[in-house]
Image (cartoon, rainbow, N blue to C red):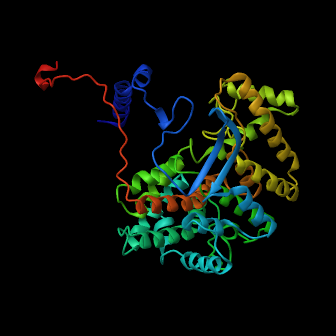
Amino acid sequence: MNEELKAKKIEELSKMAYESTLIAPHFYEANDVKRGLRDINGNGVLAGLTEISDVISFTYDKDGNKQPCEGILRYRGIDIKQFVSHCIAEKRFGFEEATYLLLFGKLPKHTELDEFNEILKSYRTLPSSFVRDIIMKATSQDLMNMLSRSILTLYSYDKNADDISISNVLKQSLSLIAQMPLIAVYCYQAYSHYHGSDSLIIHNPDPEQSTAETILYLLRHDKNFSDLEARLLDLCLILHAEHGGGNNSTFTTHVVTSTGTDTYSTIAASLGSLKGPRHGGANIKVVKMMEDLQKNVKIRTDENIKEYLLKLLNKDAFDKSGLIYGVGHAVYSLSDPRTEVLKNSLKKLAAEKHLEEEFELYSKVERLAPEIIAEKRNIYKGVSANVDFYSGLVYKMLGLPLELYTPLFAISRIVGWSAHRIEELSNNGKIIRPGYKAIAEPQKYVPIKERG
């Protein structure tokens, strides 16, 4: 079969596969199926319990009625705003402290944090020739696939890869948390060299640097960055480290962990989930959407911006998806606490980079988009800008390439995945297996000679 005929046949088979799997919407309603594991009001189906973090978007009044509230995110019971405010006031990097808190359920003392940082620094290295033999070979068009392949390959370097005792899983988790920045940056450098013809410059990490400093140090050819740049990147890492057990990639961690498989396979599965544009790639969409706005709206009055946002909702602008990216969240309604924290610090970076005008444009869209959405859509709860709305702008101001946006999310979220993996193993849960009801009608097998 030649290639042209094969392509035609695949197209025919694809249509057949699509039509054979379509399920009429009324079946979902008749069987009370919670599509996306969410009910008609957007509430997640309760599938487990966790002590690692809490995402709050509503309270109850005296009559027991649900009321939207300003969003709250707690790591191990501690409000993320309080956590971040102390890091900023004391001018310390906080990602490593957040990692300790999420993994061990308490804030570390000075000595405990120092010891923990020493452990992480000792793991911030890759096996001999790993960069040359694994990362530099067969580079793909997407860094998330390169990241997944690298993580899976590390299994081969671990003599106790299949040991799922808590002590061994913790050791593996700490190693991967420390290695992820190296893998992500090196994957980008290999990608940009082989697919973008850029110079290939590989730096070894400085063991005295924080995770945020390490990323900028490895990525920039001259190794230079400002203190404000590093601290704002550290803030992004803190805010993305964890977000409850129900987000798609963390739920994937629970599902895969429940089978009893190894840490490397689990993290690779979570990376596959995060790669999906509905989960980890939203901030890229925000940046591209805002660039399209700047290109098409020259005089940026409120009315002109509203007109553009209306075109987005009507599928007449940008990617014609009908979405205003970065606005709205599956859980939060009135506000996303991470957005407020990030915006306050971002304003300082915008001043340092002389990009106040772009920052003000984002602020306008943040203010106007909820108004337009409320007017045009029937929404059951409030809508506000989420953390992705500003995180992409942070990365853009830091000069980070678009290809690294989702890997940066992974560098941070692997902390939450690790904590949830340990939690799943510690509680000896059953293998996660939700129900799916079959609705196909029984039919008899017809011998091949009678099929016409």
Residue 44 locus on image (x, y percent)? 52, 39
Residue 394 locus on image (x, y percent)? 74, 54
Q: Relative to residue 121, is residue 355 depicted above or below?
A: above
For image coordinates 40% across by 73% down, the residue present is 158
Q: Relative to residue 297, is residue 223 depicted above or below?
A: below
Residue that lies at the very extreme toward the front in this rendered image: 62
Left or right: residue 9 compared with residue 363: left
Q: How many marks?
A: 0
Residue 20 locus on image (x, y percent)? 34, 25
Quadrant, the C terminus: top left
Residue nearest the observer in this picture, 50 or 405: 50
Asked if one can make out residue 355 in the rendered structure from this viewpoint, the answer is yes
Asked if one can make out residue 195 in the rendered structure from this viewpoint, the answer is no
For image coordinates 71% across by 61% down, the residue present is 83
For image coordinates 42% across by 72% down, the residue present is 168
Residue 64 locus on image (x, y percent)? 62, 34
Q: Relative to residue 396, is residue 107 depicted above or below?
A: below
Quadrant, the N terminus: top left
